[in-house]
Image (cartoon, rainbow, N blue to C red):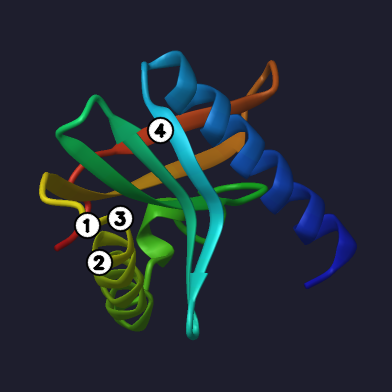
Amino acid sequence: MSTKAHRLGQAGEDAATAFLLSKGYELLHRGYRYSRAEVDLVVRRGQELLVFVEVKARSSTQFGYPETFVTERKKQLFRLAAEHLQEELAWNGDIRFDILAVTPATEGLRVEHFEDAFY
C-alpha cells in the first residue's frame, strides 16, 4: 500500500473510531486479527451488542462509493474472525456487521454508518 493510501486508511480508521465513540460505542479492538482475517474495529454497545466494523476510506467517489468495495471473500473472513472472537470472549449477546464509509468532505472527513451491512 502506498504511503498516501496508508495515511488515508489510518485517518479513516481514526475518524470512524471517533464517530463510533461519539455515538456511545466502546472500542474493544482495533485491527483485530485471526488467521488471515482482519477486522478494522470491534466495538460494543452496552452488554448486549458486539459490532464488527469494516472501515472503507476512499479519496473520492470517482470509482464508486467506499461501502461497495467489501468483497464476498472479505465478508467470509469477517465472519471467521467474528466467530473466533465470540468464542474468545464467551460472547452470548447479539452481533452485527457494519461498514463505515469515509470520504473527504469540505471540512475534514465524512463518515457514513451502514448498520447490518451484511450477514
Pointer 4 with pointer 3, Cβ within 8 A: no
Residue 92, position as x, y percentages in the image = 11, 50
Residue 31 position, x and y percent, is 57, 58
Element on which disc 1 rests? loop
Does 106 sit above or below residue 47? above
Question: Could you tell me how far apart the alpha carbons at marks 2 and 4 are, in whole angstroms?
Answer: 30 Å
Quadrant in which the C terminus appears: bottom left
- Residue 28 horizontal side relative to residue 7, left or right: left
Disc 3 + disc 2, Cβ < 8 Å: yes
In the rendered view, does 90 fall on the left or right side of 81? left
Judging by the rendered image, the residue that carries numbered circle 1 is 90
The residue carrying mark 2 is: 87
Badge 3 is on which residue? 89
Q: Is residue 12 visible?
A: yes
Position of 96 relative to 83 (above/below)? above
Q: Residue at x 30, y 77 (%)?
A: 80
Q: Residue 112: which disc?
A: 4
